[in-house]
Image: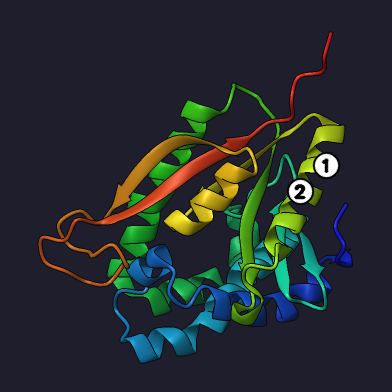
């Protein structure tokens, strides 16, 4: 059991989660890659608006927003049967404005690279009709890293998923986060590469770059002992 206090909520937490996650993901390679039309200064200034759209769409799809130890870390989990890329809720959340800000290149990277690769990984790693939770984001305040906050949040979700008999799916965008998830029992389903020939591993533009690694991962409850 976590020694920290964890609380949960819904759409009323979008603003607080946006504030934390937009800071925690400042150097995320995939987000940097998508926001390729912006300078670093423009990208950092735009991140709160970017996260507001995604988290609003999440909330409209019944996501829960968990925080731990007075927002030292937070996580966004979408329940089985719901998808953040639901077109109806994306439009209501301001997605068209986000696409405009991403530019043609960013839109192409999101819709023709990231989404198809993620969907293909799900077909590979999930059984047909299998219900799963989607761990959309987990982020921690920089000064709170290494205190086990994100681990405690994920273990809470694993406890819920175990009771319900569901898997948990996520995409890890850094080797550090991949290591944390692996330690918590997640298995790599697919290792994917974005931007081969045009991006560096940190997501910035680089001619003949090696591209960005990200990993589709799944966790399932242990089978009951017969």
Identify the residue position indicated by label 1 in the image: 159
Q: CA distance from mark 1 to mark 2?
A: 6 Å
The image position of residue 196, as x and y in percent, is: 20, 53
Q: How is the image coloured?
A: rainbow
Q: Identify the mark at residue 155; answer none if there is no mark.
A: 2
As helix, strand or loop, the secondary structure at mark 1 comes to: helix
The number of numbered badges drawn on the structure is 2
Q: Residues within 10 Å of mark 1 (few under 14, many from 20)?
A: few
Residue furthest out toward the top:
226
Tag 1–tag 2 contact (CB < 8 Å): yes
Is 70 placed left or right of 51 in the picture? right
Measuring from the top left, give residue 36's x and y in whole percent.
30, 74
Is 109 positioned to the left or the right of 65 in the image? Answer: left
Asked if residue 15 can be seen in this view, the reply is yes
Residue at the image point whose x is 51% and y is 81% from the top = 47
Q: Please provide percent x and percent y for residue 72.
A: 73, 76
Q: Quadrant of residue 90?
A: bottom right
Q: Residue at x 64, y 48 (%)?
A: 83
Left or right? Give the position of 141 relative to 42.
right
Can you tell which quarter of the image residue 129 is in? top right
């Amino acid at each position: 059991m976590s020694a920290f206090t964890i609380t949960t909520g819904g759409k009323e937490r979008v603003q607080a989660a946006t504030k934390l996650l937009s800071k925690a993901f400042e150097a995320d390679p995939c987000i940097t890659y998508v926001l390729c039309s912006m300078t670093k200064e423009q990208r950092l200034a735009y991140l709160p608006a970017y996260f507001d759209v995604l988290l609003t769409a999440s909330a409209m799809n019944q996501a829960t927003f968990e925080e731990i130890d007075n927002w030292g870390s937070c996580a966004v989990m979408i329940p089985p049967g719901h998808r953040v890329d639901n077109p109806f809720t994306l439009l209501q959340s301001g997605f068209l404005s986000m696409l405009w800000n991403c530019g043609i290149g960013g839109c192409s990277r999101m819709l023709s690279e990231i989404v198809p690769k993620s969907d293909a990984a799900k077909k590979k790693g999930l059984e047909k009709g299998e219900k799963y939770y989607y761990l959309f984001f987990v982020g921690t305040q920089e000064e709170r890293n290494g205190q086990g906050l994100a681990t405690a949040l994920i273990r809470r979700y694993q406890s819920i998923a175990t009771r319900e008999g569901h898997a948990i799916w996520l995409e890890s965008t850094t080797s550090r986060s991949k290591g944390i998830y692996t330690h918590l029992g997640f298995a790599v389903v697919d290792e994917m590469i974005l931007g081969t020939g045009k991006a560096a591993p940190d997501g910035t533009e680089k001619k003949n770059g090696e591209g960005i690694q990200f990993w589709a991962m799944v966790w399932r409850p242990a089978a009951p002992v017969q």
